[in-house]
Amino acid sequence: MNDADVAKQIQQMVRFINQEAEEKANEILVSAEEEFNIEKLQLVEAEKKKIRQEYERKEKQVQVRKKIEYSMQLNASRIKVLQAQDDVVNSMKDVAGKDLLNVSQHHHQYKHLLKDLIVQSLLRLKEPSVLLRCRKDDYHLVESVLHSAKEEYAEKANVYPPEIIVDQDVYLPPAPHHHNAHVSFCSGGVVLASRDGKIVFENSLDARLDVVFRKKLPEASTLRKALLSIVELVTLMLSWLLIADPQGASWSGCLME
């Protein structure tokens, strides 16, 4: 083999090596580009996921704020309804209390009422001897009906007429006056108690008025629930639009003073 053949063979080997190197370099470039694209895609998806999660978090915060605002509005509406209902009940009671003052002005009718109140109290106490208190202004009216009240009670209860002692040392408070409205008062009626003072039966006009209003509380509660249902319905609609874009007397266990 001469020098020309050797040189030719060396050139062929060089070309082969260069071709192999170029092919290997291309493979490395293609592989690197694929890995880069894959990693870039993964990074992009990861960032998209973070953005979606952040958006969902903020959206939940908005929904929570809307629910809180809705709840606050609903509670405020409930308080207004309850306050309005209480104002109406108290206003009605005040009006009725003022009307009670007129009862004692009609002496003939009030005299019969006092007798009936005494008889009713005796029937509830069923004591052979009782202590009676009344207003000082009603003392003579009470004295005038005591006998008939005892006889009526004895007939109804089938017992002997009881002993009734009218307390002349301590009277029930007088009728209220405009210039002294905060002092305790009594619109009329009587209070009876056992002689030992352990059982007290309040049968004053004011006590009977309190009993009537206590009995009417369930009806007031029903009205309150109906009003609240209306408020809840209206508030819910507003929120949806926002999101879409005993026998008439009272017992007391206290001692009479």
Image (tube, rainbow, N blue to C red):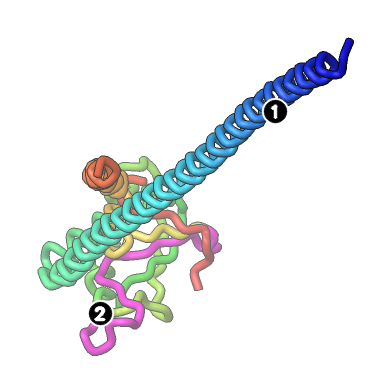
* Residue drawn 52% across the image and 63% down it: 254
Tell whether 26 sits left or right of 114: right
Q: Indicate left or right for 97 with 194 as reference.
A: left
Whether residue 257 is visible to the viewer of this picture, yes or no, is yes
Foreground of the two, 37 or 12: 12
Which quadrant holds the N terminus?
Answer: top right
Considering depth in this image, is 228 or 100 the residue closer to the camera?
Answer: 228
Q: State the residue lying farthest toward the top.
A: 1
Camera-nearest label, 2 or 1: 1
Image height of 22 relative to 139, above or below: above
Q: Is residue 229 above or below residue 205?
A: above
Q: Is residue 185 magenta?
A: yes
Give the number of the disc on residue 176.
2
Residue placed furthest toward the right: 1
Dot 1 lies on which element? helix
Residue shown at the point (49%, 69%) measured from the top left: 256
Tell me where residue 176 sits by quadrant. Answer: bottom left
Q: Residues within 10 Å of mark 1 (few under 14, many from 20)?
A: few
Type of amino acid under label 2: Pro
The residue at 35%/75% (across/down) is: 172
Q: In the image, which residues are magenta? A: 177-198
Instruction: Using the image as rendered, state which of residue 209 and residue 110 is in the foreground.
Output: 209
Mark 2 and mark 1 lie on one chain; the one further toward the N terminus is 1
Q: Position of residue 136 (x, y in %)?
A: 30, 79
Query: x%, y% of residue 205?
Result: 27, 63
Residue identifier under label 1: 25
Mark 2 to mark 1 CA distance (whole Å): 112 Å
Left or right: residue 5 compared with residue 63 = right
